[in-house]
Image (spheres, rainbow, N blue to C red):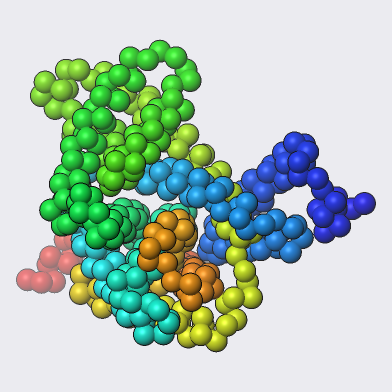
Amino acid sequence: MDFFSPSFLLAMDFSNPYYLIIGASTVIILSFIFGEVSQKTNVPSVLMLIVLGVVLQTMLSIEKETILPILEILGIVGLIMIVLEAALELKLKPEKYVPIVKALVIALVGLIASAYVAALVLHQFIDGMTMEKAWFYATPLSILSSAIIIPSVSGLSTAKKEFHIYESTFSDILGIMMFIFLKGQVESSLDDAAGGGVSSFAFKVLLTILISFIASYLIILIFQNIKSHTKLFLLIAVLLLLYSVGKKMGLSSLLIILVFGLIIANMKLFFRGPLGRWLEMEKAEHIYEGLHVVTMETAFVVRTFFFVFFGLSIVIASIFDPNVALVSMLIIISIYLIRFAVLKLFIGEDIVPQLYIAPRGLITVLLFYQIPTQVKVATFNEGILLFIIIGTSLIMTVAMVRDKQKTSVAVRKAEESPVGYEKWKAPTVTEITDDHASKH
């Protein structure tokens, strides 16, 4: 039997650990190849992973109910790793403050405006969808996917690449905070003691930031004195623990991950005065360098399996429903019209390809499955989710490919038409004398 044939896959017994190892190893190898192809073509590797999942779905009989819990765990861990990976790249220098604030404002305005318009569309076209419920569905659809953006923008200029890292990371965090706020409103309407008002939410955010700074300083000071060579995954375990405990307490615990990443990436800035005397910079730098590598590797693996499992879970036929296509297209059009207006206002003329880099992905899927039972709408078709994720990813792909082609053409023209030059000969003393004499 051919190892790569569909019949071989169908015959595989996935209760056998060796088949599981073969399958997992093959997926990781393919993900690496997809990454290399993405570097050459600018087609997002995430899109290829989703397609791989869809192809495997046609070959394997796996029930969606068995995939969803795995998908949720992979999504949570992947989110933490991706935000940490992005935070470790952010260097807080005076010249970076304006771009960071600008990216934060763009992410916030784009998120709220996109969610509002998407909620209007869902409210108008889906039966039983009140505006309150529509906000829950619209929020995940309005969050940029850092899981797709960060690996895809490496070929852009430094300024544009940094903008997308800042914007997508802020979009993730702000989007999750917005979703938590909406959930708090629902819980407070059911239980007066739940405290879902704006003041309660603001208090929780401030408390999260305070906990984030205290925990981050303690982690760095403690871990710099741990001599074991296996402390990096211990550090990640501590961060996962803090995130999960924070979530159970209703805190915006993704801020803990962001703040920790920012502090360890900018230790000279945060460890000043008396705190600076406690920090052993050389040891702390080793932690940062090791954590950076481990985070990138872990994010790669988790991202790989998340999007393959997502591909396994989706129902492709749902995107061909005319109502799904109509609602999805209206939301996609609104996304880019709002993005055009916001980028034009805050950036100016040079907004390509940034305008088209607005894919939805990991956070969208993760939050969608966390919508409270009380506000779920039975008539909502999950094909809308899939249509928007694939649609925005394809739009980004086309834009990135065209941008790369334009850059290649410009470079080729520059090489074909080099700057001219002439060989210069120093004048002799006689020539200088004669020239001086002719002027007089």
Q: Is residue 268 visible?
A: no
Q: Is residue 92 above or below residue 6?
A: above
* Whole-percent x, y for residue 429 in the image: 21, 55
Question: Is 38 left or right of 291, judged from the image as shown?
Answer: right
**Residue 48, picture quadrant:** bottom right
Return the residue nearer the eye: 408 or 185. 185
Q: Is residue 209 above or below residue 119?
A: above
Q: Is residue 14 visible?
A: yes
Q: How many marks?
A: 0
Question: Is 64 left or right of 147, judged from the image as shown?
Answer: right
Q: Residue furthest left?
A: 440
> Going 21% across and 30% down the picture, which residue do you hit?
214
> Going 82% across and 48% down the picture, which residue do you hit?
12
> Going 30% across and 76% down the picture, which residue do you hit?
131
Question: Is 418 left or right of 273, judged from the image as shown?
Answer: right
**Residue 335, picture quadrant:** bottom left
> Going 60% across and 81% down the picture, which residue do you hit?
320
Q: Quadrant of the C terminus?
A: bottom left
* Whole-percent x, y for residue 161 in the image: 36, 57
Q: Is residue 130 above or below residue 358?
A: below
Return the residue nearer the eye: 316 or 370. 370
**Residue 276, picture quadrant:** top left
Q: Residue furthest right?
A: 1
* Whole-percent x, y for residue 113 in the image: 26, 73
* Whole-percent x, y for residue 403 in the image: 45, 71
